[in-house]
């Protein structure tokens, strides 16, 4: 049924505006099972890794380096990127931020994957430590051991500073 002519109608109906929810009594408390509370922050220990925000982004960065690494016989790009991404994530977590391209550049320079002619003893050293690292479910602890070899002082350098050092000094060997 149509409305009578004398009933006024709005040309445009009023839009619903935001209204805040009613205030809750009492405060909020971090008591959920997965909540990180206290001064100690994230737990630290064997196999717990290095915590940081948006760590999956390192794989998007890693795609920029596909096909550009200097690999030798017996080395695989997927293994090199897996190990270097882990080192890059540790560096990013030292600065309490998400990974950036400089973290991965440092890791690749650290192990000589960006060198045009890496030293023969470096190639032998990295071939053994990077073998099968792309298979993280079977070789997680080998990847963690590789990350643990890198001194924190080296991770705080720039990629150019790391590339300028002899490879044994980079790793504190």
Image: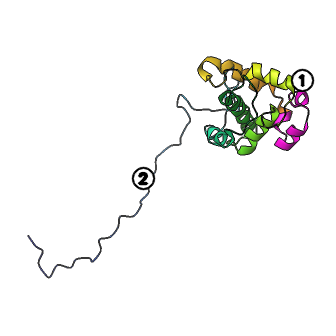
Query: In the displayed structure, does residue 12 sit left or right of residue 153?
Result: left
Residue 141: horizontal and vertical position, in percent? 68, 18
Q: Is residue 45 visible?
A: no
Rendering quarter of residue 103: top right
Q: Secondary structure at mark 1?
A: loop
> Viewer-nearest of labels 2 and 1?
1
Residue at the image position 87 percent from the left and 31 percent from the top: 170
Q: Earlier in the sequence, mark 2 or mark 1?
A: 2
Q: Residues within 10 Å of mark 2 (few under 14, many from 20)?
A: few
Q: Which mark is residue 22?
A: 2
Q: How many marks on residues?
A: 2
Query: Toward which corner of the image does residue 134 lie, by quadrant?
Result: top right
Please state, as top left, top right, bottom left or bottom right, where the C terminus lies in the image.
Answer: top right
Residue drawn 50% across and 43% down?
26
Q: Position of residue 57 (x, y in %)?
A: 62, 41
What's the magenta bit mostly, secondary-structure-wise?
A: helix
For the record, the magenta segment spans 154-172
Nearest the viewer among 25 and 78 is 78
Q: CA distance from mark 2 to mark 1?
A: 62 Å
Q: Residue furthest left?
A: 1
Is label 2 in a helix, a strand or a loop?
Answer: loop
The reply to whether residue 4 is visible in this rendering is: yes
Label 1 belongs to which residue?
Answer: 173
Around disc 1, counting alpha carbons within 10 Å, would you say few (fewer than 14), some (14 to 19), or many (20 or more)?
few
Answer yes or no: do the residues labelled 2 and 1 have beta carbons within 8 Å?
no
Between 25 and 60, the residue placed more toward the observer is: 60
Judging from the image, the colouring scheme is rainbow
Residue for point 70% across, 20% down? 131
- Asked which quadrant contains residue 82, the reply is top right
Placement of the N terminus among the 4 image quadrants:
bottom left
Residue 122 drawn in magenta: no
13 versus 28 height, above or below:
below
């Amino acid at each position: 049924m149509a409305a009578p002519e004398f009933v006024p109608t709005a040309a445009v109906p009023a839009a619903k505006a935001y209204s805040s929810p009613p205030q809750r009594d009492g405060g909020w408390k971090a008591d959920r099972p997965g909540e990180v509370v206290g001064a100690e922050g994230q737990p630290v220990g064997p196999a717990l890794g290095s915590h940081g925000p948006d760590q999956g982004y390192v794989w998007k960065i890693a795609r920029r380096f596909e096909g550009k690494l200097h690999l030798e016989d017996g080395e695989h790009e997927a293994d090199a990127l897996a190990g270097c991404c882990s080192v890059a994530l540790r560096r990013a977590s030292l600065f309490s931020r998400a990974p950036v391209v400089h973290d991965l550049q440092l890791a690749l320079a650290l192990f000589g994957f960006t060198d045009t002619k890496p030293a023969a003893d470096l190639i032998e050293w990295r071939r053994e430590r990077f073998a099968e690292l792309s298979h993280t479910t079977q070789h997680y602890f080998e990847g963690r051991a590789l990350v643990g070899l890198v001194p924190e002082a080296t991770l705080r350098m720039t990629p150019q500073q790391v590339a300028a050092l002899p490879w044994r000094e980079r790793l504190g060997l």
